[in-house]
């Protein structure tokens, strides 16, 4: 692999090979030389000696260009293959692109609506079927469901990483396919489960969406994500390198970085895709509380499998195999006594059989901690 | 007329082979890349050559013969010219010489091929043995070595250094051949006409001198080109890997600018390097041209005087053009030699690491009848000055489930490492089945103790192969184990069932499913003792329940030592051992410890295992069903 990074010279990768190959070729040249000599000799017995010498020396010189021609032929073959692959990539037409003359998104009320949205990655394998919901400023939507039910897909559709195959998605009535991608993505903040950390400082990673953000905003974001204290205690502070070559962060810390990054630009719609799964519950509660403050005026979607993360939502939808099977507030869903209820009891089931004494102690300690 | 671009590979500083771009891992930071010739290393290597004496001799002989042949050819061409231009019997004499020439050519071809083939074969055999020795050794080296060394360094040894060695070995015989050829040319030129020979040969030191001056500059420039290329590629790779984030944060334009800068730097570095590489060619051509002029002028004079044959002059002209190739090959080989020395040094460094944990000469095999685990006043530290366990004594009775709990760093992982004898205690003893672990064979210890670790390491291979792993389980046994841990259903739902190939590290199935597979693997071995380090990673509740049930199946009828995180696991254990800062502070079953209202009670109340803070405190509560949380 290191060889491919070296300035590519024809035949360079295998150091010894071309030399041997060329030597073999040399032999053929020599043979040709000999053959020619024979011919010359038998047919031109009166060849002046000088001419013969001349001829031999010319043949000697000929070796060089012949070798070059061979190398060019070899590298031409390689170039064609590689070039072919390059053009394959360059020729890919992006399926999700701005419509010509698309206007910028001008949100008025910040209401996100999914209208009978269908989606499939591959034709014939529907991932989402007939998804409809609506959320407005200051409201929260919770999405829950078993793995593979399509939760993350919904999250990916809002910033238009993919386009729905059926139905439409609108913001304040405007189809998101009709506005510029850049304005859409400025308005929609997606906090993913795993923050991709770039090979740079903490500051640069957190401010990735807005590299010119003032320090106060950056610190504000990390404080919201409950990460500020940890960063402050690092020997390099905010200048510490993270990412491939840097300090290794735990899963929970990476998720909080993701949250901080999502909060910095101040989008109007925020989507949290299972972004607190690796954070312990105590810290998660703090994150949630401070996020609630920060997202007061935004429309928020929380995708999680831990019910405590989204029990407070204004509406919760339960997905199963791409369809909404139950929806409502937490209380309404419990009252239904269906899937949601089962999930809830599953998550609190271990508390069954908790003795009175245990519960008392538990309470005491939890209260003391707060 | 050689390809000077090949010289650019000489700038190769790190040994060739897959390189990780992570400074913490891959590159040999601070390690010697080039080392001077060290006879000790050569001597150790000769041990690897000893089993293949004939290949070595054959390759060398063939190389030398081919060198002679390759010098002979121009000489004979010269003879042809001479014969053709003088005498009356010329046709007859020419025929003889031409036959001789053809023979020389054939000999050259054959010996070339033979030498190349033999030397490659030899190099491969030696490398094979080196690789095998390294791999074998790594398997047995104590974990303490592995702890201190980055994975990347180890990979660098196994791949990069061995590759550097291979490159060197493969081209060594041909280099020796080149050297012989050079000597042959020099000898011929001097012997035939020492005056002309000497004049012509003056070109040689000039060539060597120019190359020596050019080399240091070129190394720097080539290395810079290599680094620039790395940086640009790295930036591209990072952008592609994080493309979701890049698109989400609308960084496409800015990242493009940043990348363009790096690409431009790279272009400049490559151009510089090409220039430098190209510099040699005209220099050599000029020198060669000068030499040819000398030959013709002085040689011509000699011919006219009758002191030299015309053909010999022709031979000189052809031979002088063959000078540079061997000089170049030799200097390239010298660099390769230095790299190979450094690589050899590091390889032997690894092979010399002593295996500290091995079987005692009279070690007995554990039968597993008695599966008691006992710690007798054990003190232990990864670093002997900093003990992680202090005077720890505990006992796990047969078929008991004992849970280890405690804050991070309290010594839980050390305990299970010691039971399995991954490390040796500093003081005290660890007993399994009544025997000190140092008195039993490592193999029997491994068979008796099954381990399930936090991060299940799954290999490329099918699901069945991963479950079966080192045991000789039949397909039915594998299925039975999978069923017992409730993995059978999801396996059957996969396209190829048990034959589904797993990606690297088991990437194509979820974390929870990987856990279940590692349970099945432990079950298939059917060990008497089970050590479990519960995973803390958050798994979705749907799989969580399956795992809890699977654990029950796993524990049944075995002696279990568990580092527990799930409250359910802890609560159901026969005995709980609470560790803090390397000491046991509390011990006993759940109810007893809760009654104490001490550290355990605190931990229990505030930790959240697979669920989290309950609703309560005035929020909406479930109406359906009665939950026993009464206060």
Image (spheres, helix red, strand yellow):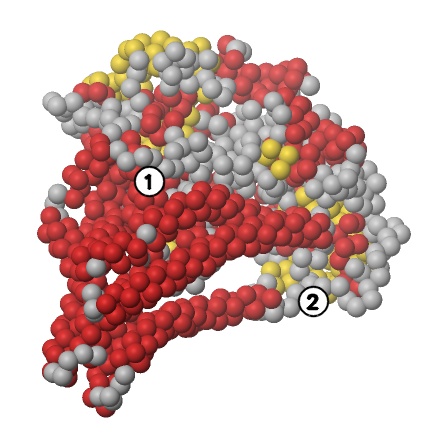
Q: Chain letter of disc 1? A: B
Asked if residue B451 lies left or right of residue A165, the reply is left
Q: Residue at x 65, y 25 (%)?
A: A237
Look at 62% across and 30% down and name the residue there: A240
Q: Secondary structure at mark 1?
A: helix
Quadrant housing residue A211: top right
Q: Nearer the viewer, residue A213 or B408?
A: A213
| Pointer 2 residue | A166
Q: Is residue B430 visible?
A: yes
A211 shown above or below A353: below
In the shown orientation, is residue B294 left or right of residue B602? Answer: left
Front residue of this view, candidates B328 and B416:
B328
Residue at x 74%, y 29% (from the top left corner): A219
B557 left or right of B564?
A: left
Q: Mark 1 vs mark 2: give the one in front.
A: 1
Total residue callouts: 2
Residue, disc 1:
B338
Q: Chain of mark 2?
A: A
Query: Please, what secondary structure does the residue beneath circle 2 have?
Result: strand
Quarter of the image that includes the C terminus of chain A = top right
Residue neighbourhood size for the residue with mark 2, other residues' Cα within 10 Å, grouped as few (<14), some (14–19), many (≥20): some
Give residue A208's position: percent from left, percent from top: 70, 42
């Amino acid at each position: 692999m290191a060889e491919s990074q070296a300035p590519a010279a024809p035949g360079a990768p295998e150091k010894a090979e071309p030399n041997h190959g060329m030597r073999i070729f040399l032999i053929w040249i020599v043979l040709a030389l000999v053959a020619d000599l024979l011919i010359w000799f038998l047919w031109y017995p009166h060849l002046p000696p000088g001419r013969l010498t001349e001829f031999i020396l010319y043949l000697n010189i000929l070796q060089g260009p012949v070798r070059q021609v061979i190398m060019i032929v070899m590298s031409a073959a390689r170039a064609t293959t590689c070039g072919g692959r390059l053009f394959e990539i360059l020729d890919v037409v992006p399926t999700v692109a701005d419509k010509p003359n698309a206007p910028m998104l001008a949100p008025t009320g910040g209401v996100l609506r999914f209208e009978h949205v269908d989606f499939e990655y591959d034709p014939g394998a529907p991932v989402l079927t007939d998804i409809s919901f609506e959320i407005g400023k200051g409201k929260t939507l919770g999405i829950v469901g078993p793995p593979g039910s399509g939760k993350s897909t919904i999250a990916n559709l809002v910033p238009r990483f993919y386009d729905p195959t059926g139905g439409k998605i609108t913001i304040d009535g405007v189809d998101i396919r009709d506005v510029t991608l850049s304005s859409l993505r400025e308005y929609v903040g997606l906090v993913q489960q795993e923050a991709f950390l770039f090979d740079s400082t903490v500051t640069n990673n957190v401010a990735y969406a807005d590299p010119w953000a003032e320090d106060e905003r950056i610190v504000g974001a990390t404080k919201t994500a409950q990460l500020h204290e940890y960063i402050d205690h690092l020997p390099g502070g905010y200048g510490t390198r993270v990412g491939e070559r840097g300090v290794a962060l735990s899963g929970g810390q990476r998720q909080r970085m993701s949250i901080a990054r999502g909060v910095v630009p101040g989008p109007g719609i925020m989507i949290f895709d299972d972004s607190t799964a690796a954070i312990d519950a105590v810290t998660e509660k703090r994150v949630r509380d401070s996020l609630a403050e920060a997202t007061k005026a935004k429309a928020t979607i929380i995708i999680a499998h831990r019910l405590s993360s989204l029990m407070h939502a204004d509406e919760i939808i339960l997905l199963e195999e791409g369809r909404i099977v139950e929806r409502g507030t937490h209380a309404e869903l419990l009252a239904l006594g269906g899937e949601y209820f089962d999930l809830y009891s599953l998550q609190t089931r271990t508390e069954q059989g908790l003795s009175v004494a245990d519960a008392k102690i538990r309470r005491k300690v939890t209260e003391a901690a707060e | 007329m050689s390809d000077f671009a090949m010289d650019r590979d000489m700038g190769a500083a790190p040994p060739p082979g897959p390189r990780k771009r992570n400074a913490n891992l891959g590159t040999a930071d601070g390690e010697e890349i080039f080392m001077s010739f060290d006879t000790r290393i050569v001597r150790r290597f000769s041990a690897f050559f000893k089993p293949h004496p004939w290949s070595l001799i054959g390759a060398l002989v063939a190389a030398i013969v081919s060198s002679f042949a390759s010098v002979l050819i121009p000489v004979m061409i010269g003879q042809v010219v001479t014969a053709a231009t003088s005498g009356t019997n010329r046709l007859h004499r020419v025929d003889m010489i031409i036959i001789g020439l053809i023979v020389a050519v054939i000999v050259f071809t054959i010996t070339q091929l033979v030498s190349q083939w033999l030397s490659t074969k030899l190099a491969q055999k030696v490398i094979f043995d080196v690789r095998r020795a390294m791999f074998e050794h790594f398997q047995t080296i104590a974990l303490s070595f592995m702890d201190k060394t980055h994975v990347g360094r180890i990979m660098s040894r196994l791949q990069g250094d061995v590759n550097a060695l291979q490159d060197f070995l493969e081209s060594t015989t041909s280099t020796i051949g080149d050297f012989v050829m050079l000597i042959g040319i020099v000898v011929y030129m001097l012997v035939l006409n020492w005056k002309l020979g000497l004049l012509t040969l003056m070109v040689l030191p000039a060539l060597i001198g120019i190359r020596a001056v050019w080399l240091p500059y070129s190394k720097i420039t080539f290395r810079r080109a290599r680094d620039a290329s790395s940086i640009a590629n790295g930036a591209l790779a990072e952008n592609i890997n994080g493309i979701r984030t890049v698109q989400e944060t609308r960084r496409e334009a800015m990242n493009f600018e940043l990348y363009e800068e790096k690409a431009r730097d790279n272009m400049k570095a490559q151009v510089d390097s090409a220039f430098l590489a190209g510099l040699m060619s005209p220099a050599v051509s000029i020198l060669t041209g000068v030499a040819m002029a000398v030959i013709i002028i002085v040689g011509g004079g000699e011919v006219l005087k009758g002191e030299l044959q015309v053909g010999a002059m022709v031979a000189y002209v052809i031979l002088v053009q063959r000078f540079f190739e061997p000089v170049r090959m030799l200097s390239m080989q010298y660099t390769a030699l230095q790299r190979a020395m450094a690589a050899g040094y590091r390889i032997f460094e690894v092979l010399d690491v002593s295996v500290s944990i091995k079987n005692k000469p009279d070690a007995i095999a554990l039968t597993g009848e008695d599966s008691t685990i006992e710690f007798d006043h054990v003190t232990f530290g990864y670093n002997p000055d900093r003990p992680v366990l202090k005077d720890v004594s505990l006992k796990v009775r047969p078929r008991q489930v004992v849970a280890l709990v405690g804050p991070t760093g309290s010594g839980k992982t050390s305990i299970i490492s010691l039971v399995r004898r991954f490390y040796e205690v500093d003081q005290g003893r660890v007993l399994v089945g009544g025997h000190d672990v140092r008195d039993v064979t490592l193999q029997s210890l491994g068979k008796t103790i099954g381990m399930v670790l936090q991060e299940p390491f799954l290999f490329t291979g099918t699901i069945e192969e991963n479950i079966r792993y080192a045991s000789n389980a039949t397909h039915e046994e594998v299925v039975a184990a999978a069923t017992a841990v409730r993995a059978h259903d999801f396996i059957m739902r996969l396209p190829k069932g048990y034959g589904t190939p797993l990606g690297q590290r088991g990437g194509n199935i979820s974390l929870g499913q990987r856990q279940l597979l590692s349970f099945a693997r432990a079950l298939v071995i059917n060990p008497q003792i089970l050590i479990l380090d519960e995973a803390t990673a958050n798994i979705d509740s749907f799989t969580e329940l399956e795992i809890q049930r699977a654990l029950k199946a796993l524990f049944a009828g075995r002696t279990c030592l568990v580092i527990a995180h799930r409250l359910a696991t802890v609560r159901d254990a026969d005995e709980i051992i609470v560790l803090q800062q390397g000491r046991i502070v509390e011990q006993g079953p759940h109810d007893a410890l809760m009654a104490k209202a001490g550290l355990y009670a605190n931990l229990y109340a505030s930790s959240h295992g697979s669920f989290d803070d309950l609703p309560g405190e005035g929020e909406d509560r479930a109406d359906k069903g009665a939950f026993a949380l009464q206060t």
